[in-house]
Image (cartoon, grey):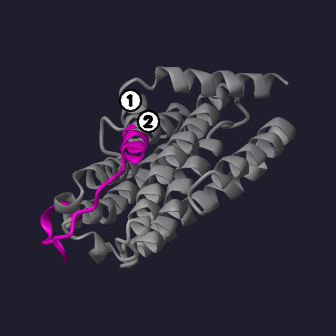
């Protein structure tokens, strides 16, 4: 599924191939990643705005989200200096892990609603979801706020560490990329928050409620906690990412 676990596999391949195997050639492949990152942010976010289908919107938003990961990977080596490599690559790893957790939760909500017989293909299908199922609406809102980068959710910290890596490079070009990424994040916030508005402020299509079984409620609560807690206390996960990257760079 686009926007879930396969993204982790793609990131792992990039780390093994580019960082572990071709870091002396970073000046070459980083230029390609920068082009891809800029294009991903520019294409994915405006395309997502135009979508009325929820799944397509999330799929296009994945393109934009991957732009941040590419920016992290592209800022590890600056002018032949690798001092920023560990922070930049660990920031990219932190971002992809937390994004996958959030994307799985959001797509999971859509699948659970479909299982309950509640149409959720179109954004308009979520109208008044809070009145029908506060739990589903609440977890979906947490995921969308996180994807939009709203603090204190984990998506905000993921974007922050990537932007810090860009700025820490000390290059005016990378600072410009950071500003560009922030502007594209503002564009992305529009279509994420639009869905929240539909769930909480639009009138429901039907008054039928959606009841979640106890096991589903437990899983959804855990998913919501995984999106919230690492944003408040990101140190543990970020340290693990940093240690993993350090071992890769040292191998």
Q: Nearer the viewer, residue 117 or 56?
A: 117
**What residue did someone put label 1 on?**
229
Image quarter where the N terminus lies is bottom right
* Figure check: 46 above or below 153: below
Can you tell which mark lies on residue 194? none
Q: Residue at x 73, y 43 (%)?
A: 12
**What residue did someone put label 2 on?**
226
Q: Horizontally, is 92 left or right of 20 in the view?
A: left
- 222 drawn magenta: no
Res 155 → quadrant: top left
Q: Horizontally, is 204 left or right of 43 in the view?
A: left
* Figure check: 104 above or below 191: above
Magenta span of residues = 199-221
Q: Nearer the viewer, residue 193 or 206?
A: 206
Q: Horizontally, is 63 left or right of 152 in the view?
A: right
Spatial CA span between label 1 and label 2: 6 Å
Q: Dot 2: within a 10 Å radius of its alpha carbon, few (fewer than 14), some, or many (20 or more) residues? A: some
Q: Residue at x 36, y 79 (%)?
A: 52
């Amino acid at each position: 599924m686009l926007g879930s676990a396969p993204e982790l596999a793609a990131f792992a391949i990039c780390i093994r191939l580019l960082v572990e195997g071709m870091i002396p050639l970073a000046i070459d492949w980083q230029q390609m990643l920068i082009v891809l990152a800029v294009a991903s942010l520019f294409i994915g976010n405006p395309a997502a705005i135009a979508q009325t289908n929820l799944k397509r919107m999330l799929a296009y938003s994945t393109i934009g989200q991957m732009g941040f990961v590419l920016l992290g990977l592209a800022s590890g080596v600056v002018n032949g200096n690798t001092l920023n490599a560990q922070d930049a690559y660990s920031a990219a790893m932190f971002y992809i892990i937390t994004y996958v957790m959030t994307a799985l939760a959001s797509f999971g909500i859509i699948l659970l609603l479909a299982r309950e017989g509640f149409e959720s293909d179109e954004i308009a299908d979520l109208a008044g979801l809070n009145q029908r199922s506060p739990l589903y609406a609440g977890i979906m809102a947490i995921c969308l706020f996180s994807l939009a980068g709203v603090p204190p959710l984990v998506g905000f910290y993921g974007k922050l560490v990537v932007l810090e890596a860009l700025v820490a490079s000390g290059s005016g070009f990378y600072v410009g990329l950071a500003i560009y990424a922030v502007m594209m994040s503002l564009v992305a916030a529009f279509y994420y928050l639009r869905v929240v508005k539909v769930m909480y402020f639009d009138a429901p299509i039907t008054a039928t409620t959606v009841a979640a079984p106890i096991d589903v409620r437990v899983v959804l609560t855990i998913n919501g906690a995984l999106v919230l807690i690492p944003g408040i206390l990101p140190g543990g996960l970020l340290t693990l990412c940093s240690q993993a990257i350090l071992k890769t760079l040292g191998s």
